[in-house]
Image (tube, rainbow, N blue to C red):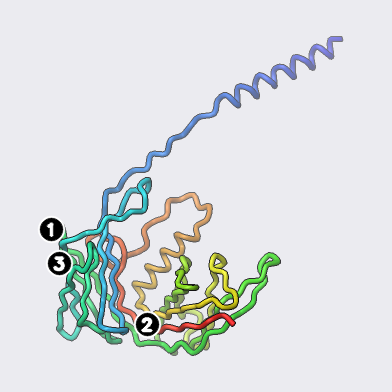
Amino acid sequence: MKSKIYHQQIFCTLLVFAMLLLSCKKVINIDFKDAGSLLVIEGSVTNQGNTQTVKLSKSVAVTDPNNFPAVSGATVTIASSDGKTYKLLEQTAGTYITNTLKGQPTKTYQLTVVTGNKTYTAISTMPNPVKLDSIGLNLVSVLNKDYIYPEVYYQDPAGIANYYHFTLAVNNVKSNNIFVYNDDLTDGRKVSHQLRDNDLELVSGKLISIEMQCIDKNIYNYWNGLDQNQNRGGASTTPANPPSNISNGALGNFSAYTVQQSFFVVP
């Protein structure tokens, strides 16, 4: 009889202890500290056509909707290493263009943006183009489901550091994945890369568009940093802004790159 009472006392004690634990939950409110609004610059010079574009906006707090306010009234110029300077005119709010500049490989371009009594600069050198040899389609089984992935092929030049950025779109819907590569392990070799995006289903009749960009090292570092942030998964540390080549604390990048495009329909 004493044993039965003793076990009942233990059970009741554990029950009360468990109830106390359940009642001691603490709600933790995360205070996202606003670092202040920063200028975001997205600009490029390519060897495709004479129109070059620079977009200016302001960053927003992490708790705000992704509605980035445009920055109007800035003075935007691009100077080339051959001594010419091009002034960009504001076409729409925050979008500045020039129709008289066609980028040339090996030339260096300097972007200058003046807004809010601050001056921001960035420099990028356009590499020589590397030929996109061909594009294939591969059928790959992932978790018992078949996917079609485009694969790009090119010959990397030997003895030169090369950096590549590819974009992929299916029926004019652009992939959010980042496809960026260097030639640290492929210098002078025949190279192939699958451009995988399981959110863009490739089936017969769909239009695929691929763009190959030859970029400089600073822009490779930018895209690679952005890619690492996207693929952090369950990492506990806060993602950092990717390394920008723009001075004075601005976000974004300014890139001079060569362009090759390919379009085809999935058979």
Rendering quarter of residue 10: top right
Image quarter where the C terminus lies is bottom right
Label 3 sits on residue: 75
User: Mark 1 and mark 3: span between their CA atoms?
Assistant: 11 Å
User: Mark 3 and mark 2: span between their CA atoms?
Assistant: 27 Å
First in sequence: mark 1 vs mark 3: 3
Residue at 15% x, 67% y is 75
Q: Is residue 167 left or right of residue 12?
A: left
Q: Are marks 1 and 2 in contact (CB under 8 Å)?
A: no
Residue at 30% x, 78% y is 256
Rendering quarter of residue 243: bottom left
SS at mark 1? loop
Label 1 sits on residue: 117
Rendering quarter of residue 49: bottom left
Above or below, 180 against 14 in this view is below
Where residue 215 appears, as percent x and y from the top left, is 36, 78
Three-letter residue code for mark 2:
Val
Residue 3: numbered disc: none
